[in-house]
Amino acid sequence: MLGVESRKGVLVIGGGIAGIQAALDLGDMGVTVHLVEKTPSIGGRMAQLDKTFPTNDCSICILAPKMAECFRHPNITLHTYSEVKEVLGVRGDFAVKVLKKARYVKEEECVGCGDCSVKCPVRVPDEFDLGMRRRGAIYLPFLQALPMVMTVDRDNCLYLTRGVCRICERVCTREAIDFEQQDTEIDLNVGAIVVATGFDPFDPTGLSEYGYKRYQNVITALEYERLACASGPSGGHLIRPSDRKPAERIAFIQCVGSRDVKNNPYCSTVCCMHATKEAILAREHDSAVQSYVFYMDMRAVGKGFQRYVSRSEEEYGIQYIRGRVAKITEDSEGNPVIWYEEPLSPTPEKMVVDLAVLATSLIPRRGMEELAKILAIELDAYGFIKTASLAPFDSSREGILVCGCCREPVDIPESVAQASGVAAKAAEIATGGVR
Ligand SMILES: Cc1cc2nc3c(=O)[nH]c(=O)nc-3n(C[C@H](O)[C@H](O)[C@H](O)COP(=O)(O)OP(=O)(O)OC[C@H]3O[C@@H](n4cnc5c(N)ncnc54)[C@H](O)[C@@H]3O)c2cc1C
């Protein structure tokens, strides 16, 4: 620790990898950090991924130690299940109101054993597994969640919606359930604010040409990540949702909603690489699997990325087919049929596969517009936070800094690099450094 004497703390909004890294760097510099995360656990999207390109590290295995460090750090206070409601003041002196939602569970008593969830009579789609699994109305978002504390989902709990049940209360041997809990407001005074609210995957249901939701064996790349994951809804087996048979021919369709003037004209930057990774993983799961990546042009611009793509072709036999997919239909056995045109071919081609995986664009998080109003910062034409070329981490309001996918789509190494850059700037502001 550098042990800089902190005049004021820093507020970090968003507990994904970018927010976690920014908080850790600041904490290690001796700066007091308040990390506000909207959902019940820190971790963000990286917690949902199976492996990470270009090293194929297990995503949660490299993320969990950072989450734990953040959770235990003496200079970091986590405010999970919380949202920023008001920001007044100026650079160096912001007054912030945070709303902490009631979990209806005592954080100091609950150990996350999950007995209450097993006995809960309600079953609703689990957000973490993108609806491919169901959870109780009292739940832990995922196995490695931090804090490891159950949360009662107020929209689905029978007691909170209809005044009946309270089974969780009877089951909990630690008497951790507390239906008297109320939402609380927390006042913070900080010198700088770091926004790291990340991205949402684009919903391709409206793009009828791909048949998503109409055909069961057309899924998104994030759904595929959950299927490939050993702790995911299929126990890591790459099976077709329609009949649970192993998928042996898999098509990865690139630029779904990206580089498309009708939807999101920008490049989402991570899809060429995550499709390559997902195709490699399929082969590693089962050497009989054949994967095809349908792409417009390959964007492998990060460190080690081109070598990763070359290895996927040479060592894993992944086939890259250049051409935009025009449509996906379904044959009588529930197999997706990919219709595509190759640049030099005069006729459209078609390929029958077991599973089609859509690499959907990365879009700003839901609620970004509302947060931008609270923070009084500007968004760009696509809803990401506006920054300038020579001030890439500065928002339009002095003292409010930006990193990770809320700025633009970026991969994990870039999110981490930006987070460290932002932390250095935020520390300078919070500790009253030179301007
Ligand atoms: C299918 C897929 C596969 C990928 N595979 C890889 C890979 O292999 N390697 C790689 O490098 N990258 C990969 N990526 C990209 C990677 O997911 C991102 O780079 C990374 O998650 C960005 O982290 P982040 O912290 O910016 O955002 P996020 O992970 O989105 O985290 C943002 C956090 O902010 C919280 N939040 C949002 N709004 C608010 C609010 N108003 N208040 C408080 N908290 C809020 C969210 O709940 C979340 O916890 C992949 C992406 C996809 C879609």
Image: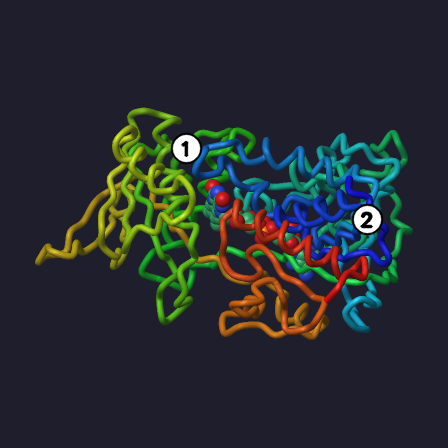
Is the Cβ of the residue at disc 1 closer than 8 Å to that at disc 2? no
Front-most of residues 193 and 216: 193
Front-most of residues 127 and 278: 278
Q: Is residue 294 left or right of residue 434?
A: left
Residue 25 drawn at (x, y percent): 70, 46
Can residue 91 be seen here? The reply is yes
Residue 364 drawn at (x, y percent): 55, 62
Query: In the picture, residue 256 is in which quadrant?
Result: bottom left
The label number, if any, that marks residue 426 in the structure image: none
- Check disc 1 and report the residue beneath it: 238
Mark 1 or mark 2, earlier in chain: 2
Label 1 CB-ligand 1 distance < 8 A:
no
Foreground: disc 1 or disc 2:
2
Query: In the picture, residue 128 is in which quadrant?
Result: top right
Give SS at disc 2.
loop
Residue 104 drawn at (x, y percent): 84, 48
Q: Write the residue at 70% across / 66% down.
A: 400
Q: Is residue 257 left or right of residue 381?
A: left
Q: Is residue 331 left or right of residue 275?
A: left
User: Considering only vertical position in the picture, is 169 above or below 389?
Assistant: above
Residue 321 drawn at (x, y percent): 22, 47
Q: Write the residue at 42% across / 66% down.
A: 264
- Check disc 2 and report the residue beneath it: 4
Indicate the quadrant containing the N terminus: top left, top right, bottom left or bottom right. Answer: top right
Q: Is residue 367 left or right of residue 275?
A: right
Q: Write the residue at 88% across / 62% down.
A: 187
Front-most of residues 275 and 305: 305
